[in-house]
Image: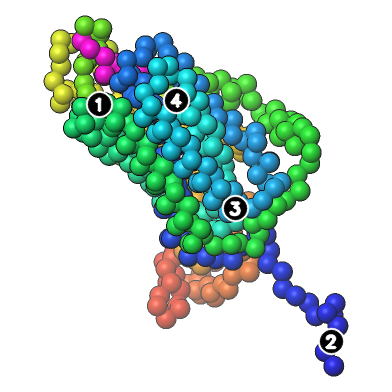
Amino acid sequence: MLPAASSVPLPVPAPSAPPRFNPWPFVLTLPLMSALPNAASLGVATIFYKSLGYSNEFIGYTGALFVPFALSFLWAPCLDRSGTKRGWQLGLSLALAAAFAALAGVVACHPATPWPTLAAITAIAFVGGTAEVSMNGYFLHALDARQQAAFSGVRVAAIRCGQILATGVLLKLSADHGVKAGDPLAGWTWLFGVLAALFLGSFAYHAWVLPRPPTDRPVPVSPGLGSYRRAWAEFRSLPGVGAIVAFYLTYRLGEGLMVRMTAPFLLDAPARGGLGLSVGDVAIAQGTVGFITSILGGILGGWLIKVRGLRRTALPLALCMTLPHAGYLWLALARAPSFAAVQACVAVETFGYGMGFACMFTMTMVIPRGRVPRDPRRDFGGAVVGRLARTHILQRPDRGARRLSPAVRAQHGCRPARHRPHLPPAPAPAGCRADLPARGGRVTRSGARKPGGIRYSA
């Protein structure tokens, strides 16, 4: 006779420890594809409208296309309430393929006004921002905590590769295609058509490789504005919230005001104060060399913060982000600078931006803790310190383990020293006492303790 179903305990996977999947089939492709709508609606759209002869004032207004990416967290609870993150990811890929196909069709019809294309690009921005939220939520279910930490850098690199693909490689190829066809709109139609095909292929590929985590299911979310009020109240409870808001509003103020006008400045004719570069030249200078140097600057900035600490490097890194803007002033004052000089100025500016953005990214991780730690290097070297504590210090209590506080032990997952097996102390020489704290010494391979590390007193 079989036992009753209620008497058989069934193992239930813990939500905090999802089953491990092989992340390589999707950990590169999902971030890469999520970067394409952002690059298309912000970087590519600016060059698109400028190449068609629209005014700089109109291009400045298109900066509002960043709003859907910045405010996508507002409708993130709707994704949690209905459907799975995997289903949302696949559905949004189809929606982006349809939006890019519609944009290619509108451009092929040679519209007399920019509003049809602007409506399609706005739809791409909203769907792309939602896809980023869905992708981040899916990674929380498909990867465990260790995999999320291990693949964070891989995801950032994939996003940068997606930006280089959209604003560098594809933009350069579309410009060459438009030159061969004798019609710039033919090149833009080809570009948006290729993006539509990429998202259609992304849907087919991810429908095949994306796993189905058991924790990826709809979750109940409180209706109304209750969750938003609680989040706002928690944010207001942070100490120094006014300084936090001022930091985020002013840190990238100069770069934010300039970034929308760099492409029009490079593309405008010299008679109008520009440099008269072609779309292909801008794709090489900004879309390829610029993104590569920004990656290198971010790596260097993170290393400097790790070595010198955040308090010592915050102001220098902020200056690294702001001072290279003077290079564009020199380009504006110079008379017909060479393309090599333009590339050098763009490379220096994007390299400094990468260094400064590393500081801002670190502050984003530190500020939710309520304060900037006095030794921020612990935030970057915590894993290294924890490894040393587990394998070196706490294994040898005579070499500084007593100086670790219980809070530091708990932070690095170390057991208290009293739970560690202690080696017997070496006998004190005749006429001396060894009641003073141990301050060194060495343990031999056989397990014997060298008495040289114990401080004796007569």
Type of residue at label 2?
Pro
Q: Residues within 10 Å of mark 4 (few under 14, many from 20)?
A: some
Q: CA distance from mark 1 to mark 3?
A: 40 Å
Whether the residues at callouts 2 and 3 have beta carbons within 8 Å, the answer is no
Q: Secondary structure at mark 3?
A: helix
Q: Is residue 425 left or right of residue 230?
A: left
Q: Secondary structure at mark 1?
A: loop
What label does residue 87 carry, if any? Answer: 3
For label 1, the residue is 183
Looking at the picture, how far across and down is residue 145, in whole percent?
A: 56, 57
Q: CA distance from mark 4 to mark 1?
A: 17 Å
Whether the residues at callouts 1 and 3 have beta carbons within 8 Å, the answer is no
Q: Is residue 209 left or right of residue 337?
A: right
Q: Is residue 421 above or below residue 83?
A: below
Type of residue at label 4?
Thr
What label does residue 117 carry, if any? Answer: 4
Q: Which residues are magenta?
A: 259-270
Q: Is residue 358 above or below residue 81?
A: above
Looking at the picture, how far across and down is residue 66, in whole percent?
A: 50, 27
Between tags 1 and 2, which lies in front? 1
Looking at the picture, how far across and down is residue 147, in whole percent?
A: 50, 58
Q: Residue at x 51, y 46 (%)?
A: 94
Q: CA distance from mark 4 to mark 2?
A: 66 Å
Q: Residues within 10 Å of mark 2 (few under 14, many from 20)?
A: few
The residue nearer to you, when weighing 309 against 189, is: 189
Q: Confirm whether residue 373 shows in the render.
A: no
Main SS of the magenta part reads: helix
Whether the residues at callouts 3 and 4 have beta carbons within 8 Å, the answer is no
